[in-house]
Image (spheres, rainbow, N blue to C red):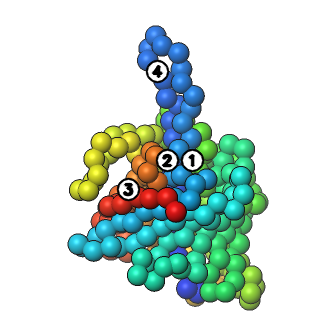
Amino acid sequence: MKIQKVGTRHVLVAGTAMITALAGMTGPARAAENYGQYSLFAERSAGQYWADGQAGGQWAWKPLSSTTSEISWGDPKAWPPDYAEKFVHDSGWLMLDGWRGNGTYYTVRVTQEQIGDAKCGNLRTFATSGQQHYVKWDIPAQGYCLKAWGTITEQSSGKVVDFGHTQIWSPPAPCSNRYLGGQTCVKQWESWWDNQGEPGKPITRKLERDQYIARGLGMAFKIQQYFPKDWLAEARSYWHW
């Protein structure tokens, strides 16, 4: 997920969920797929996506340890950016800790998180503090919804922004774009809300989009943005560095 900036922060759209794959009705079950196989979270992987006939952006994962990795998003003409989000693989989850940019670090901490079915029904609260639960590591057979509310704190100034983030993760399915075909993707729908620049005010919608993440390739296979404007971007190249 890409994240709009606090100050000049971005909203990443990174993320991915997966299903338990079965060899067949009578065959033995295969090991469950996981987020790492789709996002390439633990590899020095990168990709570039195009929109309107030109490069619309670039991303790259930079592993920091066996459980922690940063992902940067930015303009390929001004690479590398100073912006990077930090994710931590903790047991059955990939957690969002925060991001760096503008010469400082922004921590993400939740005050409430809920999980429910793929229509955001049957919601139950499962966390009220800590890092944001971004995506399940192992892929369940059904889609699911995650809702998070909390605060983003700019470490250099102490400024706080309130946020709300809703995601719906769908199981893997065949996918293609105008440049690459014959892939398998998980889809993340997300809606991001905050009150940046208006401390204490209600949060308002800042982003709504779908992102498709391709198994063995990585992030941003296709991004269909719906808000604040309609915009389509599609991956054209992937590599390791």
* Three-letter residue code for mark 3: Phe
Quickly name the residue at label 2. Answer: 38
Toward the viewer: 59 or 106? 59
Answer whether labels 3 and 1 touch (C-beta < 8 Å): no
The image shows residue 134 at horizontal and vertical percentages of 60, 55
Label 1 crowd bin: few (<14), some (14–19), many (20+), radius 10 Å: many
Quickly name the residue at label 4. Answer: 23
Q: Secondary structure at mark 1?
A: helix
- For the residues marked 3 and 4, what is the alpha-carbon distance in whole angstroms? 26 Å
- For the residues marked 2 and 3, what is the alpha-carbon distance in whole angstroms? 10 Å
Quickly name the residue at label 3. Answer: 221
Is 207 on the left or on the right of 232, as rendered?
right
- For the residues marked 3 and 1, what is the alpha-carbon distance in whole angstroms? 15 Å
Answer whether labels 1 and 2 touch (C-beta < 8 Å): yes
Q: Secondary structure at mark 2?
A: helix
Q: In the image, what residue occupies the spot 53% across and 79% down?
A: 81
* Three-letter residue code for mark 4: Ala
- For the residues marked 2 and 4, what is the alpha-carbon distance in whole angstroms? 19 Å
* Three-letter residue code for mark 1: Gly
- For the residues marked 1 and 4, what is the alpha-carbon distance in whole angstroms? 20 Å
Toward the viewer: 237 or 159? 237
When asked about the image quadrant of residue 33, the answer is top right
Q: Secondary structure at mark 4?
A: loop
- Which comes before the other along the chain, label 2 or label 3? 2
- Which comes before the other along the chain, label 2 or label 4? 4
Toward the viewer: 228 or 41? 41
Q: Relative to residue 25, is residue 151 depicted above or below?
A: below
Is 227 on the left or on the right of 54, as rendered?
right
Q: In the image, what residue occupies the spot 74% across and 82% down?
A: 155
Label 2 crowd bin: few (<14), some (14–19), many (20+), radius 10 Å: many
